[in-house]
Image: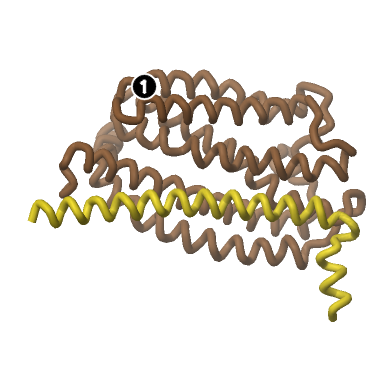
Amino acid sequence: MLNKIIFFFEMDGYAFFIWSAYAFWFFLLTLLSIKVISRKNSIEKKIKELYLKEQ
Amino acid sequence: MLLKKIHRFANPNKFLKVIYPFKKISLYMAVFLLFIGLMDALLFSPPDYQQSQTVRIMYIHVPSAWVSLLAYIMIFFFSLMYIIWKFPLFILIAKEIPIIGISFTLITLVTGSLWGKPTWGTYWVWDARLTSFLVLLFIYMGLIFLEKAFKFSNNGDISFAYISIIGAINIPVIKFSVDWWNTLHQPASVFRLDGPTISAEMLIPLIIMSLGILFLFFFLALTNVESAIQEKKINSQNFRG
């Protein structure tokens, strides 16, 4: 079982290229998603504050 | 008739109502498809007989490249509609896409470079496909700088629209660069007149990953557009809609 896992992560000796590519892909998409969602949340918070002020 | 329909959706409040369910569906579909796609791409798809395991980079590289091109086509389309009909919503949508487009372009270039080293023996070569993709990255950068420069006014809208339309010349160059010039990059193997040349075992995870990344792009773009509309409302103090 352990051998199978090691074999999978080694990727026939191409581990550096494959896992670096996937890590970069995951990192950048996570960063982009966080940026987009946090912008949306902060605007919604502002709208709530403005709405409460007007009340 | 078409103009009437466009008029209806050019109203930001109506547009927000329309996109809300699409946004949610896009997020759920993206998470589901990316999970299935990654499992298939990393665990079940076979290695290539020539490229061995490095072919697994294809499942993130190719969909990212397609989405970065699609993002630019959408910017072009909305800029053109803005120039024709002058609806502010169209340029607002166009201005929210470059940040997502540049991210996918960067992913394409970096993953392509990491795929190139074991396959071609080099991380980078100034061939037509790679260079035209780098030009796309610079065009996206230009559009983002332009958008930031005129963040609090509409003065840059027309310039943004015209520059993005001019920049669209690069899209057919990217697509046909592998046919027009001798390049290291392989020619198209999925979108071909005579059908895909890639085996079904690799084509299926590629399609699943492409759909997953496409839905993620729609979710991010729609969320950004929603934020931009709400920002405009706050700035005009008309936040009740």
Count of picture labels:
1
Q: Is residue B76 above or below residue B5?
A: above
Quadrant location, the N terminus of chain B: top left
Give the farthest residue toward the left.
A55
| Percent position of residue B87, x then y | 29, 29
SS for dot 1: loop
B148 relative to B197 in the view: left or right: left
Chain letter corresponding to the colour brown: B
Q: Residue at x 36, y 24 (%)?
A: B157
Q: Indicate whether A13 appears above or below B131.
A: below
Question: How many residues crowd around disc 1 within 10 Å: few (fewer than 14), some, or many (20 or more)?
Answer: some
Report x, y in % for residue A16: 81, 53
Pointer 1 indicates a residue of which chain? B
Amino acid carrying mark 1 in the image? Gly
- Provide the residue designation for mark 1: B156
The image shows residue A1, relative to residue B168, as above or below, that is below
Q: Position of residue A40 (x, y in %)?
A: 36, 51
Supply the letter of whichever chain is yellow: A
Q: Residue at x 28, y 37 (%)?
A: B10
| Residue B237 appears in view | yes
Task: Tell which residue pokes out farthest to the bottom in this image.
Answer: A1
Of residues B147 and B36, the one nearer the viewer is B147
Where residue B105 sits, quadrant-wise, is top right
